Image (cartoon, rainbow, N blue to C red):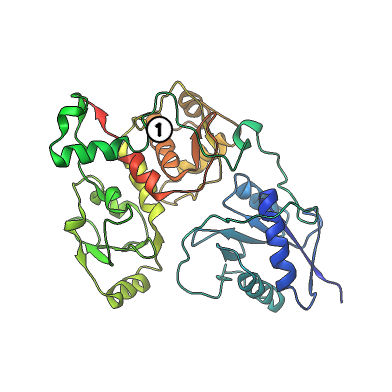
């Protein structure tokens, strides 16, 4: 019997080698074989990569079966394989494919609980057996992918806001510039490591109860994001949260369709923070680069248009407005959310993995008064 063919596409050259090693261990019965993208029966797509979504659109148009590899909890592909990747997850996926499971994007990972996104620490050399993305990435957007992003020339250091907060709370303001507006603690600050030591609930009028679990860095409380917006504009500290037990957190998780990563809340915080103004340290005179296809929230349909335009290459805010037809304030808010989560960088800065502490610090930068 002829083997069913797979192609792993959209992965970085280094990660592709690790994926192939895991595939070889999972494919013990030899039922599946690797093939070039154009010839493969099934495409396993890195949906967190810059061109993953476009690869999926092309595959869907061609009638191919698709599998999303993502740190998110949902995808519009036939199957879903959650990060972090592993032999067990791939073995489960191959079993689902072999059984001809219904195309309802079931989770191929054996664990039911959400697995927070992690960076792959060890990557082997590339091999020719795994296909590279069908569309070459712009050199400016993909240069030095493993480098640490350098700060912009006009941006304060990421720890500047933390120094400011410490000075403000300890009464040492004399040493700080007089024209800085005091930073008021918000929900995003509570997401920083060490703010909470156990699962806890925040309840405010006009918004659903929000439960945070600092151990897994996940939250529950709403299947969509917009209902949580009232929580972002009010002062919030860790003291406003009430401790909850594991049973209450689990009940809320089941009631709302699963736990979500902290980074989704930080994305929403970034979307709301500037109110049409770029975050401190960034300038509309500089171009911005989309480093990976972002998770497009269905509540914000304009973002698909913006991401599609940004895929063409580095662009100024004004160029994105003209190219997408989206209002400038919405373009800026989208850029802010991308900057916070690492999906967007200023031109010349290399992309790095999502980092919660950096995101919190970016949102807490003091503004000049």
Image quadrant assignment for residue 25 = bottom right
Q: Is residue 76 visible?
A: no
Residue closest to the eye, 341 or 320: 341
In the drawing, does residue 139 fall left or right of residue 118?
Answer: right
In the drawing, does residue 159 fall left or right of residue 184?
Answer: right
Q: Is residue 42 visible?
A: yes
Q: Please state, as top left, top right, bottom left or bottom right, where the C terminus lies in the image.
A: top left
* Mark 1 Cα shell of 10 Å, populated few (<14), some (14-19), many (≥20): many
Q: Which residue is mark 1?
A: 332
Residue closest to the eye, 344 or 177: 177
Q: Is residue 90 above or below residue 12?
A: below
Q: Residue at x 69, y 55 (%)?
A: 124
Q: Residue at x 73, y 48 (%)?
A: 132
Q: Residue 208: x, y in percent?
A: 25, 61
Q: Is residue 109 above or below residue 327?
A: below
Q: Which type of secondary structure does the marked residue at label 1 adopt?
A: helix
In the drawing, does residue 109 fall left or right of residue 16?
Answer: left
In the drawing, does residue 196 fall left or right of residue 343?
Answer: left
Q: Residue 160: x, y in percent?
A: 31, 35
Residue closest to the eye, 331 or 167: 167
Number of marks present in the image shown? 1
Q: Residue at x 20, y 24 (%)?
A: 179
Q: Residue at x 26, y 33 (%)?
A: 366
Q: Residue 264: x, y in percent?
A: 40, 53
């Amino acid at each position: 019997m002829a083997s069913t063919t797979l192609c792993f596409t959209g992965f970085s050259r280094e990660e592709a080698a690790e994926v192939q090693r895991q595939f070889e261990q999972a494919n013990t019965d030899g039922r599946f074989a690797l093939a070039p993208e154009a010839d493969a029966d099934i495409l396993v797509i890195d949906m967190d990569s810059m061109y993953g979504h476009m690869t999926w659109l092309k595959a869907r148009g061609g009638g191919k079966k698709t599998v999303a590899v993502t740190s998110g909890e949902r995808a519009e592909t036939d199957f879903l394989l959650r990060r972090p990747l592993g032999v067990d997850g791939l073995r489960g996926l191959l079993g689902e494919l072999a059984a001809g499971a219904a195309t309802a994007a079931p989770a191929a990972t054996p664990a039911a609980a959400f697995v927070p996104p992690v960076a792959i620490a060890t990557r082997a050399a590339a091999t020719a057996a795994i296909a590279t993305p069908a569309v070459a990435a712009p050199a400016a957007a993909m240069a030095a992918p493993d480098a640490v992003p350098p700060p912009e020339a006009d941006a304060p250091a990421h720890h500047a806001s933390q120094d400011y907060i410490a000075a403000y709370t300890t009464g040492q303001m004399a040493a700080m510039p007089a024209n800085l507006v005091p930073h008021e603690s918000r929900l995003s600050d509570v997401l920083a490591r060490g703010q909470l030591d156990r699962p806890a609930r925040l309840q405010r009028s006009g918004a659903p109860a929000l439960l945070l679990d600092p151990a897994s860095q996940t939250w529950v409380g709403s299947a969509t994001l917009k209902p949580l917006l009232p929580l972002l504009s009010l002062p919030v500290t860790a003291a406003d949260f009430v401790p909850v037990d594991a049973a209450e957190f689990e009940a809320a998780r089941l009631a709302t369709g699963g736990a979500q990563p902290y980074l989704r809340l930080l994305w929403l915080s970034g979307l709301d923070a500037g109110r049409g103004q770029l975050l401190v340290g960034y300038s509309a005179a500089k171009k911005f680069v989309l480093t990976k296809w972002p998770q497009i929230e269905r509540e914000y349909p304009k973002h698909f248009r913006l991401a599609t335009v940004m895929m063409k290459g580095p662009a100024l805010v004004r160029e994105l407005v003209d190219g997408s037809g989206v209002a400038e304030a919405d373009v800026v808010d989208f850029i802010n959310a991308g900057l916070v989560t690492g999906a967007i960088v200023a031109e010349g800065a290399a992309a790095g993995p999502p980092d919660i502490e950096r995101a919190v610090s970016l949102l807490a930068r003091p503004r000049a008064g």
